[in-house]
Amino acid sequence: MDTKEILLSIRDLTASVEEEEILHGINLDIRPGETHVLMGPNGAGKSTLGNVLMGNPVYKQTGGSILFEGEEITGESTDKRAKRGMFLSFQNPLEVPGLSLDAFIRSALRERTGKPVKFMQFNRELMEKMKLLSMDPSYAERDLNVGFSGGEKKKSEILQLLMMKPKFAILDETDSGLDVDAVKTVSEGIRAFQQESDGALLIITHNANILKSLSVDKTHVIVKGKLVASGDASLIDEIGKNGFEAFGE
Amino acid sequence: MSEMRKDPAIDIAEREDKIILNDVNRELYDFIDEEREEDFYRMEEGLTEEIVRQISEEKHDPEWMLDFRLKSLKIYNQTPVPDWGPPIDGLDMDRISTYVRSKSDMVGSWDEVPEDIKNAFDKLGIPEAERESLAGVGAQYDSELVYHNVREDVAASGVIYTDMESALTGEYEEMVKEHFMKLVPPTDHKFAALHGAVWSGGSFVYVPKGVKVEIPLQSYFRLNAKGAGQFEHTLIIVDEGADLHFIEGCSAPKYNIANLHAGCVELYVRKNAKLRYSTIENWSKNMYNLNTKRAICEEGGIIEWVSGSFGSHESYLYPSSVLKGDGSHAEFTGVTFAGRGQNLDTGAKMIHIGKNTTSFIDTKSICKDGGISTYRSSVVVAKSAEGAKASVNCGSLMLDSISRSDTVPAIEMRTDKADVGHEAKIGRISDEAVFYLMSRGLPEAEARAMIVSGFANPVSKELPLEYAAEMNNLIKLEMEGG
């Protein structure tokens, strides 16, 4: 298949953290609009993959290649990857005192598009998306993630996803630490993203609940830094029943 | 009583931070206007009795003021240089001209201000700010005010806003005499004595009982002359139940020889009155800023200081609040940014005398490119100040490993019937927070500037919009370089 049709192509990717190799040769192709799920036990390298794809300097890519829309992005800085249309929803979103959520999203959009953001239009859209995510509108003016509950932080990530409309987003354990209602709300937000755009998703999780109402194209299992199985959505149920033991954990 | 707390976007960890070392583009402030010699009167360099007498004569001082100046000069000569702050060996009074003025008189219309001086203020946006958002403006160029104006409706309410010289030689002489350097006596320290001897310019404000001035008054101080000193005196009296917001701005072009600023601010806040005093100080980096500011509050009076210190080579600046009256209240919110070649020693002083007085200090200091920022404060609770409450909160942000940040908070309590809290945070920008912002498309420098602006936000949000914008612009300039 022509690589140009592939949005993200990962080949023989190895990566380490503090000199210890965590990823031992990952191969993965994601096409526009596809939703992939990455599951695996704790410490398998799920979050490492997300961080390496986004260029977090703490994680070091030691080999292999990452092509985004056919272009090599290995070594490229995080902001440039974001400008290409990549996005990472953080497992633990950072708090930034003195920077309001709406001002942050506005700056990010301006940076991403290179154009000034239309104030009224932006506000209308922001309020719409916040309503969808059952977020109190007052959160828009609050300092970014400061004093947000675990659930509100994750909603703030999905809000950014919906506003930024990336071509490819990694959702790193967006469901972790959330109660049932919050998982449902966040999941609705993700579904809205799937429907509104042709953005592709890589959902990192070890909980099937968030996936219930989402359409999933492919599922991958990562164990000890290697993809050990790939399949369709039915793989999720299998893991739900039997855990990761069958995959050599 | 003291604890270290982690700021979420700030790492306490001792980690090397990569930062781009750049010189700052300060064109906006550093422009030099060549002064044509024939247009300016300039006192010879140095400090002698003869020079003080000449200044006094130039200014048509009343007799008592000349005596005051000469007495101050004696005190200056007898007082040692402070030995506890940044070194000021680079300051040689024999090479400072203490008095420089344009030969034209002060006017009440920008059109009458000499062209070159008007251009300087135009570049700083002063006339524009006056039209848009100020109730009155004073503009000092070197040693004298070149412009002073107050809106008619504000003047009609009885508010007096004039230059110190007019106040001193006119109908307010008695009021000036009663208050001038009573709060900051020349014996306070060496540079207060210097100020007493050679002071010139500044503003006099009186707000009558019950008058609430809705929009701010502003004085802008520009020191343009090379190797000169600026010694303006600001005297503000806010009478019972009145309310005022006063803003001062300062800037100067950069020369390769030392300039000196030793201003003095005295604020009298009467019963149940309220005064907010905001400063954006952006002296160029050859300036020794040895400034003294003090307020005294009567019963139920409120003083609020908002202070942004960005410029100068070295600063000693600790606005003080004397909470004399019962139930009076003081707040100090400040940010200090020390870049390359800067040693800024700033903070605040709170003196609780009255019962149930309250004070609140919230400061942020930032240092970068080898800059030194010292937070120094003193909270004194007198035996009489039963029920007093004070809180001190200081945060420091070091942007690289060659810069230095120190915290010297002193607390002195002479009664156990008071409550004083202190919290200090020292940190660096968290790499994870930078990565987070970059993951949304913000370049590294932008991400860092946003975190720093956010850190300073408690101060900028206290400023009027255009000043907050100016402050954020200054932070961005300091962060990104030219």
Image (spheres, coloured by chain):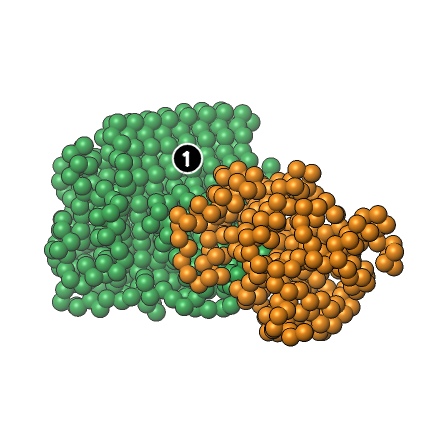
Chain colours: A orange, B green
Can you give x and y, in whole percent of width and height, for residue A120 in the image?
39, 48
Task: Pick the residue in front: B39 or B476.
Answer: B476
The residue under the point 36% across, 25% down is B299
Quarter of the image with the C terminus of chain B in it = bottom left
**Chain that bears disc 1:** B
Can you give x and y, in whole percent of width and height, for residue B7 in the image?
58, 48
Task: Pick the residue in front: B80 or B385.
Answer: B385
* Neighbour tally class for label 1: few under 14, some 14-19, many 20 plus, Cα within 10 Å: many
Residue B115, placed above or below residue B455: below
Residue B213, quarter of picture: top left
Residue B126, placed above or below residue B95: above
Would residue B416 be found to the left or right of residue B305 on screen? right
Would residue A227 be found to the left or right of residue B149 on screen? right
Task: Pick the residue in front: B143 or B464.
Answer: B464
Amino acid beneath label 1: Ala
Q: Secondary structure at mark 1?
A: strand
The residue under the point 53% across, 61% down is B441
Quarter of the image with the N terminus of chain B in it = top right
